[in-house]
Amino acid sequence: MKKKDVLIIGSGLAGLACSLELLEAGRGVQILEAKDHLGGRTSSWIEDGMEVESGLHRVLGIYQAFPAFLKKAGLEIDELVSWGDEVEIRLPDRGHRGVFGLSPLHRPLKTVYSFLGNNLFLNPLDKLRLSRFFRAGLKDHRRRPGYLDSLAVSEYAKKWQVGEEVLFHFLTPLSAGIFFLPPEKFSAFAFFSLLEPVFSRFMRNRVGAFVGGMTDVLADPVAQAIRRKGGRILTGLKVEKLLLDKDGRMAGISAGKKEIRAGQVVLAVDLGSAQRLVRRSFGSHSWFKPMLELPTMPAATLQLELFGPALKNDRPTFGPGTALSSFAEQSRTTFKDAWGRLSAILSPPDRFLNQAPNRIFQEFYQDAQRLDLKVVNNIKEYRAILHPEEFYSLSPGNQSLRPSQTTPIEGLVLAGDYTAQEFLTTMEGAVISGERAAAAILGKD
Ligand SMILES: Cc1cc2nc3c(=O)[nH]c(=O)nc-3n(C[C@H](O)[C@H](O)[C@H](O)COP(=O)(O)OP(=O)(O)OC[C@H]3O[C@@H](n4cnc5c(N)ncnc54)[C@H](O)[C@@H]3O)c2cc1C
């Protein structure tokens, strides 16, 4: 490596975004990735003969950093994403279904109607209480973030007289469906952090599916742009330790018998991996204590190849009261070659982590039938893809434990969705963290 080159550990969106920024500023970069494929939690690969992805992903129209990052790599978001304008909440055992329009710009009537209508789902009094709850939450998010982070969504909802039914029909799908946590465990601050841009960028609301496997359409093309600009990428190399020189400055990394010397390192890995590396390298340093206490949370997904579509439409659907907290039929978008393709995020994820795939499948299968999905005699094969500790936990009390990108160790910068930025554990958040890490290296704010 050249003297001024920056070593980036991790090829998720945080590492890729950081690399692009540094290259644009004329710096050299080398990315090290532990896996054989690029993209981290936005990746796709072949698992025992079946194409899988890290899990069901949707791009939100309110994202700004993510499309701008793509542009820097020469990609257009509208070519990567097939936009949809609706989400569905489906109650089990032939309960009600609510379809909600999301796009005031592209589906204005449906959007307005879905909130004025859907009265079987939410009656007018429920809607009034919900709107008071949302107004208060957005205000507290601005004025009293610490207070909001001390409460779970369910506790805050009770303060605003939101009833149990609304909690189950509406807030559970939103919290468990989007971030795998039920409202009793979901920080009200994190919840309103997600909603704030939905309201403040209201006209931009849309929801989009990738038009192919995420490594194919996203990570690999970005990596090509990085290589074109002179960046280097090494896969299959797991960093084991961060090395310091005798004055406590970054000196490089070690991976097995290999050592790479670098005075500037961006640690752009997921939270669980970052904690292990920090603990092993300089765990007693007091600055890292909060970050080492930041709890991780798991995610569990099941992905199925089908003989025919399980649903008529590909729209994000939430199944409160079942193991399928969110799911979608992807054969019209991401997996166009498949006859049918269902992807589900399972809840609560902890329960599935140590289960054999066939046990996970059995639970999925029962609940899929309760949700009226076409699964009987329709399943070709399935894979369970689990994420034991990649996410930081969105439970109350964790916001203040998230570290900044800058660290007191000279030459070491952090990136990754768990580091401090306002877009939680999302693609947008990961990109923002990577760009802030680059700014820290370049000495900009
Ligand atoms: C099932 C699921 C559904 C999701 N749905 C959405 C969604 O709908 N919308 C949305 O916006 N976001 C979604 N996300 C979140 C989004 O994918 C993440 O927030 C984002 O991709 C995180 O990027 P990152 O760069 O911070 O971390 P990661 O993508 O985790 O990247 C870290 C990289 O570091 C590598 N690494 C780790 N340790 C080492 C080591 N020691 N040496 C070398 N390399 C190492 C890893 O292999 C990985 O490639 C979802 C995530 C999952 C898993």
Image (cartoon, helix red, strand yellow):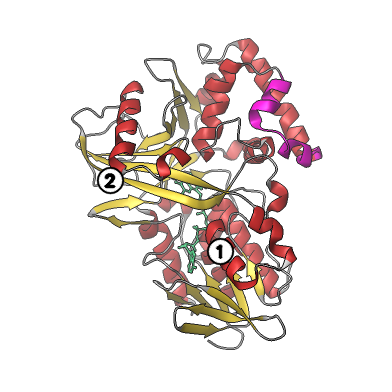
Residue segment shown in magenta: 143-160
Q: Which residue is mark 2?
A: 336
Of residues 228 and 135, the one nearer the viewer is 135
Within the magenta stretch, is there residue 306?
A: no
Which residue bears the numbered disc 1?
276
Split into 4 quadrants, where in the image is the C terminus? Answer: bottom right
Q: Tell me residue 184's x, y (percent).
A: 61, 30
Q: Amino acid at mark 2?
A: Lys
Q: Tell me if mark 2 has few (under 14), some (14-19) or many (20+) residues whose alpha carbon lies within 10 angstroms of its own.
A: few
The dot on residue 377 is none
Q: Say what secondary structure mark 2 lies in.
A: loop
Between 229 and 132, the residue placed more toward the observer is: 132
Mark 1 vs 2, N-terminal side: 1
Q: Mainly helix, strand or loop, the magenta region?
A: helix
Look at the image and tell me whether residue 353 can be seen.
yes
Answer left or right for 441 relative to 427: right
Residue 349 appears anywhere in the view: no
Which residue does the image show at 60% across and 75% down from the upper left? 265
Dividing the picture into quarters, in which one does residue 336 lie? top left
The location of residue 31, given as percent across then percent down, is 49, 73
Horizontally, residue 178 falls left or right of residue 224, namely: right
Q: Is the C-beta separation of discs 1 and 2 under 8 Å?
A: no
Q: Residue at x 54, y 72 (%)?
A: 8
